[in-house]
Image (tube, rainbow, N blue to C red):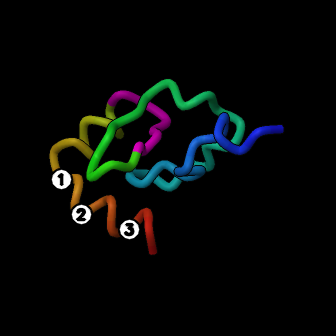
Amino acid sequence: MATKDKPKCDVDPVCNIDLTEMHGKFMYDFEDEVYYFCSELCKEKFAAEPKKYAKKAKS
């Protein structure tokens, strides 16, 4: 299985839900990295404060 088909972000950076079984329907590009979310609501929260959540996702 090719790794390029898998999202770089396996956990929603807003609510910490495991996304390994989801298809990355909700995504947002921030600082040349694509983040994936469980819902439109989490995506909107991330878009409002991307630096807050991007740090959490990388730690």
Identify the mark at residue 56; answer none if there is no mark.
Answer: 3
Distance from disc 3 to disc 1, alpha carbons, whole Å, reads 12 Å
Residue at x 22% of width, y 61% of height: 51
Residue range corresponding to the magenta coloring: 34-40
Query: Dots 2 and 1: beta carbons under 8 Å?
Result: yes
Q: Quadrant of the N terminus?
A: top right
Residue under label 1: 49
Residue under label 2: 52
Left or right side of 34 for 48: left
Magenta stretch contains residue 14: no
Q: Going by the picture, which residue comes out furthest to the top?
A: 25
Question: Is residue 2 placed above or below 9 in the rendered structure?
Answer: above
Q: Closer to the camera, 46 or 3?
A: 3
Q: How busy is the neighbourhood of tag 3: few (under 14 within 10 Å), some, or many (20 plus)?
A: few
Residue at x 33% of width, y 68% of height: 55
Question: Is residue 23 placed above or below 34 in the rendered structure?
Answer: above
Query: Dots 3 and 2: beta carbons under 8 Å?
Result: yes
Q: Amino acid at mark 3?
A: Lys
Mark 3 element type: helix
Whole-percent x and y of residue 10? 59, 50
Q: Amino acid at mark 2?
A: Lys
